[in-house]
Structures are given as structure tokens and as C-alpha cells.
Amino acid sequence: MAEAAFFDFLNKIAARKESFPVTILYGFNEFLGEKIIDAFCSNFIEAKNDFNFRRYYADIEGEANWEEITSEANSSSFFLQSRKIIVVTIREEKYLTIKKNEKEILKEYAAHPNANTILVIYISLNLIKDDYKQVKKLKIDKLLKELDSPRMYSVDLDRIQEREVKNYIQSYLKACGVSITANALDKLMETREDDVVSVLYQLPKLAIADVQGGSLDSGDIDAMITGVEAHSIWDLADAIENEDAPRYLKILSYLFTNGIKAALIIGTLITHYNKIYIAKFLLKRKMSAGEIGRALEQHPFFLDKFIHSARNFSEKRLHDILEIIYNLDYESKTSGEDSARLSLQNFAFRIRLISQK
């Protein structure tokens, strides 16, 4: 089995010199697997439809049926409209252990794959980094060894160097008509320290930035990525959920002192709780944490915490909170800044009353 790094594999796909009959995608940065899949689609098939693109899942609702999947893979032909991309997404750790008979079916297909089909086995687990390392050691490495075949590729989504990320950011923004200075690029990388891959979450925001001369500088990065609003809103939400009124009031005072208007804080809290509400719905639709983060433009620093909140918030509590804060929003727009500040200061206490009912 040939192993490839993420950006190297993207280049291989773009070159279109190989057929890629079977590819296994894995890594802690599992969200990057979607970029590989998108690259396959844009380079090897026309517009996706139900005939040329299929997804199967091994998740909480059940394991993948490999006999059905390989039969589907074998059904494609050399005719352009009959070529297929089939993605099998493994979202539950237990399905990394494939039953013996299913494993033999998959190994037989891997030994004699259909050159007109691209079969992607996409390991997309929602794990914290330490847990992922353990699962990789015990299960993913074992699976790669068991399925080893000369016709297969495995792509390590974590094999990425900082210079590759920088080059990708520059080319991505250039295609969107935006340039970025060297200082801004360094500043952007500094915000993620040892998790430079998470910078890629910010690209859609940077691509539509309204900046002078169409060029992003380090000041723009400070304002867009490292501003106080994102961090402080999360701190506010934490204080509310922990019923820590002194901390909540201290954070509010900090925001007011730094010139943040009450209406902006209220609007941001509305957005925050609405996103949690939407995330609960998307989790039920079997979307991964990475997919939800991208769909809701969730700050990578807080993605794990955000998903945890979405899983554990009751819908009733969310309804109650949103009802209070929508009333708060109305009051802020009709009674002035001082009254809005006072209402915000009382917000944490009103939330506490809900939990005591």
C-alpha cells in the first residue's frame, strides 16, 4: 500500500495520471478528508448525482455492508456517465474492526479493483487528540496492515508541514482576489501555535474580507481572528452555564470597558445559542464535528467545547434561553444603551432561575 501525505496526494489527484481505485483516508485532522473527496469529484466525474457519487456510513445506525458496497463498485464501466466515486465513512470506532467475512470481501476487491470506480474508505472519528492517538495505534494501524494491497493508497491527513499550509493559504486567497502579507501570514500561523492545520477553517472568512487594497496585513488578522469578541463570548457562555455570576459580570465589565456595545454582545449571544441549536440538529443527521464546524463557521479553538455543548444542551433549555435573549434584544433596541447593559447584567440571573424551576 502506498502511503501519501495530504498535500502531495492532492497534487497527484490534480495530475490525473492515476486511477486511484481504493484510497483510505485517516487522521486527527479528519475534516481534510472532504477536500480529498472534493478533489476526486472535480477531477474524475462531472456534476455529482445519485448515479456517479454514493456515500455509505458505518455509524451509530449500523455498520457498512461491504458486499453491497463492492458490488456497487464493480457495476461502473469505462463510459463517462457510468464512472463512480463511492465513499464509505466510518464514524464509530467499533467499525474499524471489520468482520472476518466482510474483510475477505474487501480484500478480494482491493486485489482486483474496478479501474472505473474510486472507492474511498474515510475514517472520520470525532475524538480528542489523545484518544485519537490511542485508536490509531490499536485499531487504525491494524486495519491498514490487514487491508494492505499494491493497488491501494492510504493518506495520512496529519502529515502536513507549515510551509505547505502557508503555500495553500496564499494560492487559495489569490484565487479569491485577496493577497496576504508575509507578516499577516506569520501572525495567522502564530494564532494556532502547534495546530496550524486549523488555520484552514479561517479561509472562507479571510477570502471575503473587506480590506484596503485587497491585501490582508497583520492588523487585519488581529481584528478578524484574535479579537476579544470570540474569546469573551465563550467566556460569557461558560460563566452562564457554570452559574458563576461574579465571573460573568467581570467579563461584561471588560467588554464594556473595551467599547463593545451591549447590542453587539446580545446579538453575538443569540448567534452562539442558535448555532448550538442547529448543531444539535446536524448531529442527529450524522454530520461529523469537522463538517459542523465548517458549516457553522465555528472557531477551531472552541470546536470540541462547542460540540460538547451541542450534545449536552437540552432542547427545552435552549428554547428558554433563546426566548429570554430575544426579549433582551428587543429591549436593547427600544430602551437605550444603559438599559441594555443593565438587562445584560441581569441575564445570567434570569438563566439561573430557569434551572431552578
Image (tube, rainbow, N blue to C red):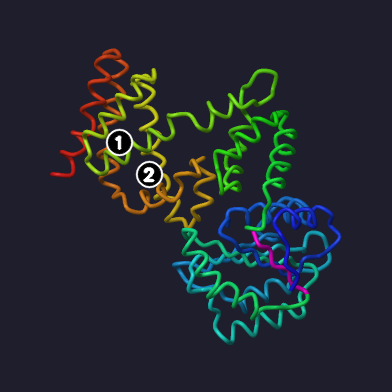
Identified at 23% across, 30% down, the residue is 347
Highlighted magenta segment, given as a residue range: 151-157
Q: Amino acid at mark 1?
A: Leu
Quarter containing the N terminus: bottom right
Query: Would you call the spot at circle 2 few (<14 residues within 10 Å), some (14-19), or many (20 or more)?
Result: many
Residue 125 in the image: x percent, y percent?
51, 62
Q: Circle 2 sits on which residue?
A: 277
Residue 279 in the image: x percent, y percent?
42, 47
Q: Is residue 254 above or below residue 311?
A: above
Residue 91 disc label: none
From the viewer's side, name the closer residue of 192 and 297.
192
Residue 226 in the image: x percent, y percent?
50, 32
Quarter containing the C terminus: top left
Residue 18 in the image: x percent, y percent?
83, 63
Secondary structure under tag 2 reads helix
Q: Amino acid at mark 2?
A: Tyr
Residue 322 disc label: 1
Residue 156, by quadrant, is bottom right
Residue 89, by quadrant, is bottom right
From the viewer's side, name the closer residue of 341 and 245.
245
Identified at 60% across, 46% down, the residue is 196
Q: Are marks 1 and 2 in contact (CB under 8 Å)?
A: yes
Q: Is residue 85 above or below residue 326?
A: below
Identified at 32% across, 38% down, the residue is 237
